Amino acid sequence: MAIGCCTLAEDQQVLPGGERQPLLELHEVVKTYPTAQGDFMALKGISADFYAGEFVGILGKSGAGKTTLINMITGVDRITSGEVLAMGVSMHALGEDQAARWRGKNMGIVFQTFRLMPTLSLVNNVRLPVDFCGAYQPRASFARALALLESMEMSEHALKLPSQISGGQQQRVAIARALANDPPIIVADEPTGRLDSATSAIIMRIFERLAREGKLVLMATHDFSIAQYFSRRLEIADGVLVADSGRVGG
């Protein structure tokens, strides 16, 4: 199976017999960290399947293991045991460079801290993943970035620096950047944590729209007050999956 930056994994969404194929599969995922007191088990055998069109909330208090799980899903940290399959690709069987390139094409990642490049204009921030993959010529990548900013109602600010816009606007730009290569999977780690409730609602409606358009959207949050936006809710406590509202629309 090809895993190059600009070659999508073969996503067989429908299996023989009509059953849908999950975009993301977690099989008994365990993560431990060494400490002075011995190994600390941050994740304790989490298993779940996720499908296109779901908006999944990964809910739990601080320290529950949400961010650790996100890091396992995206492959930015190594699992201790178990397996993460994203579109049939075993994330942790890839080398670091391979994983980065595969992730750059097939996963969009949104962070609480936005992580925009402070010296680049907003449109050039959005272009970064496109240019990394080399899928477009420079003029085409600029046009794509502008179109994504327009979809976030941010095109009029395209030439501004991140410091010249609000936190909520920066998060919209970060979402546009995550969509640059049209990935089927969007992963967000506490993306509303620094936003007021009105701005958070705007961001949540954007994620809802992306799920309706067929993306798989996974979002980790400690804020149970926004749970109504999710089509499916997973709750994690002390590294254990304690509740799963079940797959919706599968």
Image (tube, rainbow, N blue to C red):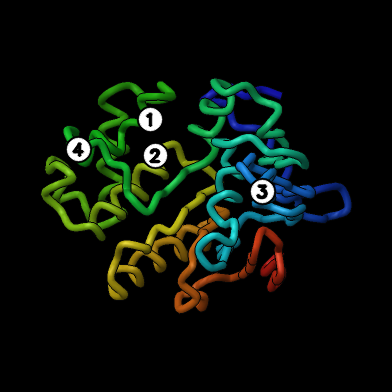
Q: Nearer the viewer, mark 3 or mark 4?
A: 3
Residue that mark 2 sits on = 180
Q: Earlier in the sequence, mark 1 or mark 3?
A: 3
> Which mark, residue 40?
3
Which sits in the foreground, 5 or 212?
A: 5
Q: How many angstroms separate mark 3 from mark 2 (CA)?
A: 37 Å
Quarter of the image for the N terminus: give it: top right
User: Residue at left 51%, top 50%?
Assistant: 187
Q: Earlier in the sequence, mark 2 or mark 4?
A: 4
Q: Earlier in the sequence, mark 2 or mark 1?
A: 1
Residue that mark 1 sits on = 130
Farthest front residue?
37
Q: Earlier in the sequence, mark 3 or mark 4?
A: 3
In the picture, residue 152 is in which quadrant? bottom left
- Inspect the image, locate mark 3, and give the three-letter code of the amino acid beneath it: Phe
Q: Nearer the viewer, mark 1 or mark 4?
A: 4
In the picture, residue 39 is in which quadrant? top right
- Inspect the image, locate mark 2, and give the three-letter code of the amino acid beneath it: Ala
Q: Earlier in the sequence, mark 3 or mark 2?
A: 3
Residue that mark 4 sits on = 118
Apparent side of residue 44 relative to residue 201 in the rendered image (left or right): right
In x, y percent, where is residue 103? 53, 34
- Inspect the image, locate mark 4, and give the three-letter code of the amino acid beneath it: Pro
Which sits in the foreground, 83 or 22?
A: 83
- Inspect the image, locate mark 1, and give the three-letter code of the amino acid beneath it: Val
In x, y percent, where is residue 147? 29, 45
